[in-house]
Image (cartoon, helix red, strand yellow):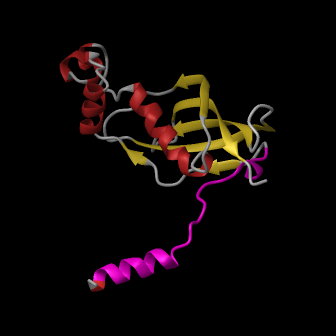
Amino acid sequence: MNPNESLVARLKGEARLRPRGNRFEDFTPGLRFTHHWGRTITEADNTLFSTLTLHYNPHYTNLAFAQAHGHRATPVNPLLVFNTVFGLTVEDLSEGGGPFLGVESLVYGVTVYPGDTVYASSEVLSARISENRPGFGIVTWATRGINQRDEEVISYQRSNLVRRRK
């Protein structure tokens, strides 16, 4: 037997699954999360996202067009801003598993430009046991995205089914 194969077999045998993310019982109304890291959005991110999503609005891919419409630079596609802020929240809010139920009250704030860094924070608005899905609860959070100057770039509410421990 290859020595590496025995090491892999031993490591697999010793490995223990550890659940990731929070469960329904961890979310009480009023609980706040400051999501870690933040993300600097680059011009390449913006161009790639806009072209891959077939979002060919020239505001997001054409500097001369954007400047002719009052922007100092090519603004970041708002859907990329949403997806970036949403992604920053996943580890704390929904990584534990459960279907995404939707977004409400989405409002965009100041324009994000390449080179801006966005950060996210969330607050639990409500948590209730699901009547239709045993083993799950429904949690709603209010999320706020800010840039490096502490200006709000986006806010929204979202809901997920979240696994229960019990």
The magenta stretch spans residue 133: no
Q: At 77% from the left edge and 44% from the top edge, which residue is drawn?
A: 30
Q: At 51% from the left edge and 26% from the top edge, which residue is drawn?
A: 109
The magenta stretch spans residue 17: yes
Residue closest to the eye, 160 or 55: 160
Q: In the picture provided, is 74 more to the left or to the right than 136?
A: left
Q: In the picture provided, is 112 more to the left or to the right than 132?
A: left
Residue closest to the eye, 114 or 30: 30
x and y, in percent, of residue 7 in the image: 36, 82
| Residue 88 versus residue 67 in the image, above or below | below
Give residue 69's quadrant in the image: top left
Residue closest to the eye, 63 or 157: 157
Q: Residue furthest front?
A: 1
Q: Residue furthest top?
A: 69
Q: At 51% from the left edge and 79% from the top edge, which residue is drawn?
A: 14
Tell me the quadrant of the picture where the N terminus can be found. bottom left
| Residue 40 versus residue 69 in the image, above or below | below
x and y, in percent, of residue 39 in the image: 41, 47
Q: In the picture provided, is 106 more to the left or to the right than 47?
A: right
Q: At 35% from the left edge and 83% from the top edge, which residue is drawn?
A: 6
Residue closest to the eye, 57 or 94: 94
Numbered circles on residues, count = 0
| Residue 123 versus residue 158 in the image, above or below | below
x and y, in percent, of residue 63 in the image: 21, 23
Magenta-drawn segment: 4-28
Give residue 5's quadrant in the image: bottom left
x and y, in percent, of residue 95 in the image: 57, 49
